[in-house]
Image: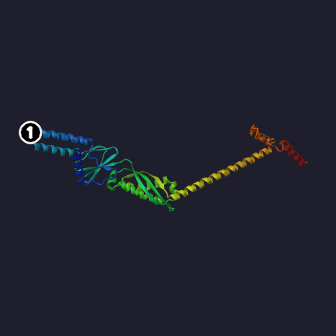
Amino acid sequence: MADIESNLINMINEKIGEKNLNKGEKITMFNGVATLIFFLLFLGGLVLGFLAFVATESGIVFSLVVFASFVLASIISSAARIAAQWEKGLLFRLGKFRGLKGPGLFLIIPIIDSVTMIDTRIQTLDIPKQQVITKDNVPVSINAVLYVKVVAPDDAVIKVQDYTYAVSNYAQATLRDVVGGMTLDELLAERQKIGEEIEKIVLAESKNWGLEITNIKIQDIDMPEDLKKMMSRQASAEREKRANITKAEGDKMAALNLSEAAKTMALSPGAMQLRTLQTIDGLGPTASNTVVLAVPIEIMEAIRAFTKSQGKE
């Protein structure tokens, strides 16, 4: 039964001329309601055929009634269509656009009307990897992902033969143009800016196609191996440079602190003696440690005081 119904609908489609549907489009021919209507009508035809057979006792009459009820049930049941919450149905009557239908249950005129269902959810389109020459003549391979939504289903179907193919290729060409006008350093550092610029250009054109570009993201940027090695060496040299600068600044600060400590000890009486005692105490009680003081600190202080007094005289 289902095969017969499918073949009948395919014949109707060929007569109407519906073919080459875009990605994301489909024709909803049968649903639960249509199937229920078909079986109820066909069951009624079987009952009428049985009554006709009882009345006429003719198998030909029974066959004609059953066949007529089958054809009538198929045509009438095809009038009931259901569109999901995220779908919009484009109604064409004898090839002419008559309006949008759905979501939910709606009726059409069998055979005369045809319906093309459009998915209005956000679709993810992959922009395939391609080789681009940057502004500073560096070849890179780059790919991206495009998020697009159908906001005007009638424009997306009527004005463009295949809107997903069209917007994908347009975004791919725009990506080459934008990346070709940037240097390698700008490309690596400003992915977000590149995506925003591509989105702005593609959105300006896709509005006429009934589409809305929600976002464009750059995924992978692949460079030649020799360039990767040079960039790695450059990054290593930059890190080493920063390490040497940091070490030099630390040595400078340590020297300044030692100089300030020496001035403080020179101006404070007994400061050197306290520092010496702290050093000796830090050596610990180990018997193997031997400390030799060539000149006692007291004698050095006495000599310094005597020298100052002599200088005054």
Taking 73 as reference, is 142 left or right? right
Q: Position of residue 88 (x, y in %)?
A: 32, 47
Q: How many marks?
A: 1
**Nearer-the-camera pick, 279 or 192:** 279
Residue at the location (16% across, 45% down)?
67
Taking 91 as reference, is 243 left or right? right
Taking 272 as reference, is 310 left or right? right
* Residue farthest right in this picture: 313
Indicate whether 255 appears above or below 176: above
Classify mark 1: residues with Cα within 10 Å, few (<14), some (14-19) or many (20+). few
In the picture of the structure, the residue carrying the numbered disc 1 is: 55
Q: Amino acid at mark 1?
A: Ala
The quadrant of the picture occupied by the N terminus is top left
Residue at the location (51% across, 54% down)?
190
Residue at the location (61% across, 53% down)?
240
Q: Position of residue 157 (x, y in %)?
A: 32, 53
Q: Which colour scheme appears in the figure?
A: rainbow
